[in-house]
Image: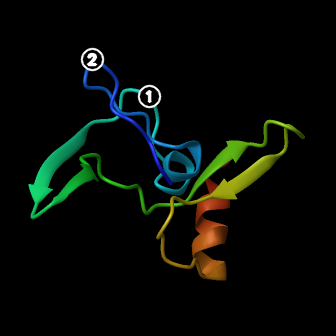
Amino acid sequence: MNTRVSTKGQVVLPQAIRKKMNLRAGDDLEARVEGERIVLIPKKERSRKGRIIKDPLTGLPVLTAGPGAPKLTSEQVAEILADFP
């Protein structure tokens, strides 16, 4: 994927990358130079804990976890659901 540096020095990250990395407006990134590359590293800690949210389409509760989260056992799912109203 390609992007361009604006006259203000800004770079837009393509939507596919933002989605894959779970990045949102206002997230902090560490920028560094490695050889001939510019590397951007998200500074926020990734949540590896499952949580329940409302599905925006159905309004039903959905169990979700961030990218790279470990697989949940049935017992862990039951524990999370026990806290849901």
Q: Point out which mark residue 25 bears.
A: 1
Mark carried by residue 36 = none
Classify mark 2: residues with Cα within 10 Å, few (<14), some (14-19) or many (20+): few
Residue 39, image x and y in percent? 23, 55
Residue 42 position in % (x across, y down) = 29, 49
Q: Which mark is residue 8?
A: 2
- In the rendered view, does 49 fall on the left or right side of 29? right
Q: If you read the primary sequence from the N terminus, does the residue marked by circle 1 or circle 2 appear first? A: 2
The C terminus: image quadrant:
top right
Q: Residue at x 43, y 63 (%)?
A: 48
- The answer to whether residue 47 is seen in the rendering is yes
Residue at the (29%, 46%) spot, across then down = 44
Q: Is residue 81 left or right of residue 1?
A: right
- The amino acid type of the residue labelled 1 equals Ala
**On screen, residue 7 above or below 35:** above
How packed mark 1 is, by other alpha carbons closer than 10 Å (few <14, some 14-19, many 20 or more), is few
Colouring used for the render: rainbow
Residue lying at 46% horizontally and 61% vertically, measured from the top left: 49
**41 is higher (above) or lower (below) than 9:** below
